[in-house]
Image: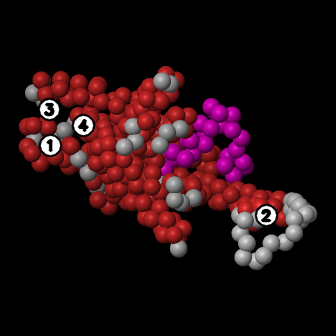
Amino acid sequence: MKGTNEQRAGLLSGIGAYGLWGIVPLFWPLLKPSGAIEILAHRMVWSLAVVGIALLALRRWAWIGELIRQPKKLGLITVAAAVITVNWGLYIWAVNSGHVVEASLGYFINPLVTIAMGVLLLGERLRPVQWMAVGTGVAAVLVLAIGYGRPPWISLTLAFSFATYGLVKKKVNMGGLESLTAETAVLFVPALGYLLWLGAQGDATFVSGGAGHAALLAATGVVTATPLVLFGAAAIRVPLSTLGLLQYLAPVFQFILGIFYFHEAMPPERWAGFALVWLALTLLTWDAFRAARRTRAQAARLAATTPTPAAPEQTLPPLPADEDSSPYAAREH
C-alpha cells in the first residue's frame, strides 16, 4: 500500500509540474508593461530568494562548500546558467509577442534535438526507429520553415538551448533544488545590477506599476521554483518512462492555449509540420517502450538461466524451532 501511495503521489507531482509548465503562458502577459529582459531579471532574483528559503527550511547547505571546492563543476554551473538565461528570456519574449504555438514547438522537438546532440557530441548510436524519428523531425522543420516563410528560429533556439542545458546538468549531477540555487546565484548579481540600473534610468516598472504589479513580479520566483520542486518529487517516485510521457503535457497545453486562448493562426502547412513532429515523437516513444520491454525480458531470461548457488552443507546440529540465533537464519534475510 505504501508503494502504491508513493507512486500515486509521484504521478500527481509529475502532472502538477508539467501542468504548471504548460499553463505558464497565462502568467507572463500579466507582467506587461514590463519587458522580457526586466521580467527575466526579476525571475532570477526572486527565484534565488525562494529556493534560498526552501534550503533554509530543509537545512540543506552542505553541498555549497563542496561545490566551491570544485572549479570545473562551478564552470559547468555557469554554462548552465547562461544557457537557461537564453531559454527563459526567449520564452518570455515569445509568449508576450504572440508566438506561443511556435514556442510550444520548441519543447515538442526538444527530445529529437537531445537525441541528435547525443549522436553528434557523445558518439551515441541510434536504433533504426530513432533515425526515422529524427529524419521525420527534420522534415517537419523544413515544412514549418516553408509555412512560416522563415526557419522556426524561436522553436529551434528553445529546443537547442534546453537540450544543451540538459546535457550540462547531466554532467553537473546535482539535485534540482541545489542546481537551481547555484544557477540563480550565478545570475543574481548581473540580474540585480540590471534592475538597479533600470531603476536609476526611471524605466523600472516594479515601483511605477503599483503594489499589484510588484507582487506579480515577485511571484516569478514561486512560478519558477514550484514546478521544479514537484518535478523533483516525481522523479524519485515514478519510472523514467512515465516521466518521459508526462513531459509532453507541457507543450500540449501550450499548443492548446496558443490556438484557443491566444487565437494564433494555424494555416494548413503548420498543421502538416506539427503532424510530422507528433509522428516523430510517437515513433520515439514506441521505440523507447519496445527497448525497455526487451531489456526486461532479457533480464528475466538471464535470471531464469543463472544457476542458484547450492546451499552450504549443514554441519551444525539443528536448533529448536523457537531459536533465532542461528547464523543460517541471518543469511536467509
Residue ID for mark 4: 42
The magenta-colored residue range is 108-131
Q: Are marks 2 and 3 in contact (CB under 8 Å)?
A: no
Residue 328 numbered tag: 2
Q: CA distance from mark 3 to mark 4?
A: 11 Å
Tell me if mark 1 has few (under 14), some (14-19) or many (20+) residues whose alpha carbon lies within 10 angstroms of its own. some
Q: CA distance from mark 4 to mark 1?
A: 10 Å
Toward the viewer: 262 or 309? 309
* Mark 1: secondary structure: helix
Q: CA distance from mark 2 to mark 4?
A: 63 Å
Residue shown at 19% from the left, 47% from the top? 216
Q: Main secondary structure of the magenta part?
A: helix
Residue ID for mark 1: 214
| Of the image marks 1 and 2, the number of the one nearer the N terminus | 1
| Of the image marks 1 and 3, the number of the one nearer the N terminus | 3
Residue 204 numbered tag: 3
Task: Answer above or below: position of 238 versus 52.
Answer: below
Spot occupied by residue 183 in the image (x, y as percentages of width and height)? 39, 33
**Does 199 appear in magenta?**
no
| Nearer to us: label 2 or label 4 | 2
| Of the image marks 2 and 3, the number of the one nearer the N terminus | 3
Residue shown at 72% from the left, 65% from the top? 325
Q: Are marks 4 and 1 in contact (CB under 8 Å)?
A: no
